[in-house]
Image (tube, helix red, strand yellow):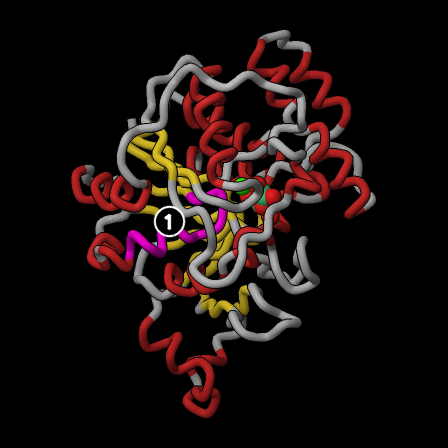
Amino acid sequence: RRPILIDTDTASDDAVALIMALRSSRVEVKAITTVAGNVRVEQATRNALFTVELCGAEVPVFSGAAKPLEGELQTADWFHGQDGLGDHGYAPSVHATASGDAVDAIVAAVQSTPGIEIITLGPLTNLALALERCPTIAHSISRCVVMGGAPCCEGNVTPAAEFNIWVDPEAARAVFASGAPIEMIGWQLARFDAVLNEREIQEVLAFETPLAEFAIRANSTAATAYLAQTGETGISLPDPVAMAVLLDPKLKLEVSPHYVAIECKSDLTRGMTVVDRLGVAADSRNSVVWSDVTQRDQKVEICWKLDVPGWK
Ligand code: BDR
Ligand code: CA
């Protein structure tokens, strides 16, 4: 089984992604690290511990960054519920948080686990701090699947930016510049026909297991908020889409490598993932802004199309 580490701001769709990994025979989850994002980090940690327990798994959960590298935390409890899991009053897990800090846990896991893959399901704060603490780990991560970004320039929190990148663009910039082999799973992949529709929701509930019930119920406020935001019914599951791609890379139907810059300053476009789709950044006449990116950064593999039936 392939070793993986999951970094997550555990709320409703993160929890489904955790279930997928913890119940998969393809991967072994070495550690889960939590980060502030959808909810405060204490709540994200509680939710991760609860999900691990529900899966009957024994995986250490390390609590991580409580706020972005710069500025104040902006949560999305309006979308995921005050507790991040749809406010159904789930009891706290009996399991305790692992001792030690998430950033150290990431560094240690990469250093001690050849071939480890990392998947980030929240803001990139923990990973940026780990790469700052030990920059060489960038080259020991065998895959780095990032759920984040809006490569088609359709954001979900501002017109330009997707939530995970928008919450901590400075961290995203550091991670994208680190040389780690990033596979970007943008928010657009989880829309339209990739959304779990009402029939599919009923199919999941028909399993009549605690996990199936939890997976749907925890996403109840998210479904309502998604309908209000996009006019689309059903449950949108960006983190499970990213996890599906981690588990089975064949689900990526169209990918291409590009330089990607993260906008950190502009009020209008802060958190935007600016993709050099046509390769114009390599032209020295365009180098004023892009020379920094093309000199230091590795290209990011962007997935443009998902095998939707395969993912479902
Ligand atoms: C991302 O932001 C969060 O709301 C979800 O958990 C997902 O990681 C989608 O933009
Ligand atoms: Ca998330």
In the displayed orientation, state which residue is furthest to the left. 112
Graded by Cα atoms within 10 Å as few (under 14), some (14 to 19) or many (20 or more), the crowding at tag 1 reads many
Above or below, comparing residue 161 to residue 54 in the picture: below
Q: Looking at the picture, how far across and down is residue 221, in whole percent?
A: 72, 32
Q: Quadrant of the N terminus?
A: top left
Residue 142, image x, y percentages:
28, 46
The reply, left or right, for residue 296 in relation to residue 108 is: right
Residue 17: % across, % down = 51, 31
Q: Which residues are magenta?
A: 120-131
The quadrant in which residue 267 appears is bottom right
Residue shown at 48% from the left, 87% from the top: 286
Q: Which residue is mark 1?
A: 126
Q: Is residue 119 visible?
A: yes
Verify whether residue 128 appears in magenta: yes
Give coordinates of residue 52: x percent, y percent. Answer: 43, 21
Would you say residue 306 is visible in this rendering? Answer: no
Q: Nearer the viewer, residue 296 or 84?
A: 84
Q: Is residue 118 above or below residue 262?
A: above
Location of the C terminus (image quadrant): top right
- Circle 1: element type: helix
Q: Amino acid at mark 1?
A: Asn
For ligand 1, which image quadrant applies? top right
